[in-house]
Image (tube, helix red, strand yellow):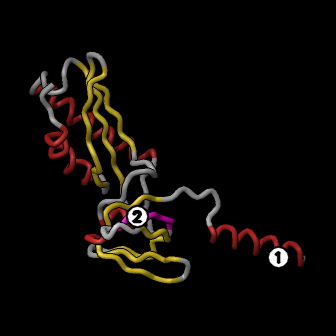
Amino acid sequence: MTASAAHLQALLAPLVAETGSDLEDVSVSKAGKRSVVRVLVDRDGGIDLDDVAEVSRLVSDALDELDAQDPKALGPSYTLEVSSPGVDRPLTAPRHWRRNTGRLVLATLADGTSATGRVAAADEQSLTLDLDGSARTLRYDEVVRGVVQIEFTRRDQEASDQEASDQEDTA
């Protein structure tokens, strides 16, 4: 196997961009005699199964062409896995923060502290967290790491459920 993840990233990024998605990561690993090529894609508004299928076709065609040109690039056989990043993916780029507007996140800061709040806004220079009604704007160089927090019931959903319950009580 001679194809590195960086080489595949350069090959596949423009193809994935044609679909309106971003290539988040490419990894290549060995699984017995096979190679496993894992491709993570995302886009604003999220990615669905149709998007994954479209990307899979393009990526598969490109890898088949690479394999025809250099049979040693991916080894004797390979498996392609295309998916979206999981919720546990760290937020490292401005687009990651933007795509998680409204979600609860834990931001680890460069000064050693942390902040937990909802992403209220994000642009190319900074993000704003809603910390229980108080807004805090952070430049990306102030944030070491961000992680979406799992919520089984969001506060705004609880309020909506309570309003519905109150309306039923008065009817």
Looking at this view, is 117 or 119 the one in front? 117
Q: Amino acid at mark 2?
A: Arg
Tell me if residue 88 comes above or below residue 129 in the rendering. above
Which quadrant of the figure has residue 36? Answer: top left
Q: Which residue is mark 1?
A: 167
- Write down the region rendered in magenta: 103-109
Task: For label 1, count other residues whose C-alpha is less than 10 Å away and answer few (under 14), some (14-19) or many (20+).
Answer: few
Between discs 1 and 2, the one toward the N terminus: 2
Whether residue 31 is in magenta: the answer is no
User: Residue 66 in the image: x percent, y percent?
Assistant: 15, 31
Q: Amino acid at mark 1?
A: Gln
Looking at this view, is 103 or 41 the one in front? 103
Task: For label 2, count other residues whose C-alpha is less than 10 Å away and answer few (under 14), some (14-19) or many (20+).
Answer: some
Q: Which residue is mark 2?
A: 99
Q: Secondary structure at mark 2?
A: helix
Instruction: Considering the whole magenta stretch, tell me its main secondary structure.
Output: strand
